[in-house]
Amino acid sequence: MTIRVRRAYDPPAAEDGCRVLVDRLWPRGLARENARIEHWLRELAPSHELRKWFAHDPARWDEFRRRYADELRAPAAAAALAELRGLLAAHPVLTLLHAARDTTHNNAEALREWLARGRPS
């Protein structure tokens, strides 16, 4: 199983496998028909409050990941995590998509790291 992270604005690639958007809002200006987004799990996005607090400030990255992990463990994320686990089991490659300009400090990367540590339950 391979989990990749890419910007939703990047052109779809054959090696993306199953493409899953994990942002709460649809990326501005991205045409749905061209995006090749197969699933949109907005419940896996950080809360509005957490996203606003983080503001993609690299100095807040560690604390953001800790707070985001707390949100992922909350009951509100359970159904979306179950769906994501099913997608992970069904596809050898899964690409988590985000709209952030920062390709290192974003919720999709934090989610990939969290999943890699074996925290999907």
Image (cartoon, rainbow, N blue to C red):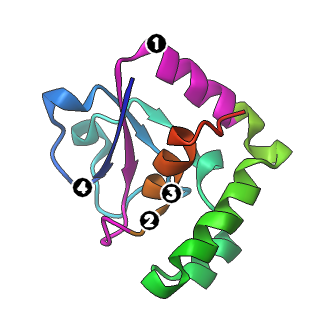
Mark 3 = which residue?
110
Residue 9 - label: 4
Q: Which mark is residue 114?
A: none
120 lies left or right of 40:
right
**Residue span colored magenta:** 80-104
Within-10-Å neighbours for mark 1: few <14, some 14–19, many 20+: few
Would you name the residue on which mark 1 appears?
A: 90
Residue type highlighted by circle 4 = Tyr
Mark pair 2, 4: CA separation: 14 Å
Amino acid residing under circle 3: Ala
Q: Residue at x 60, y 36 (%)?
A: 118
Q: Quadrant of the N terminus?
A: top left
For label 3, the SS is helix
Q: Secondary structure at mark 1?
A: helix
List the residue tagged with mark 2: 106
Q: Position of residue 84 (x, y in %)?
A: 57, 30
Residue 34 sits in quarter: top left
- Residue 119 included in the magenta stretch of the image: no
**CB contact under 8 Å: marks 3 and 2:** yes
Q: Quadrant of residue 45?
A: bottom right
Task: Give the amino acid at mark 2.
Answer: Asn
Q: From mark 1 to mark 3, how far is it between C-alphas?
A: 22 Å
Q: Are marks 4 and 1 in contact (CB under 8 Å)?
A: no
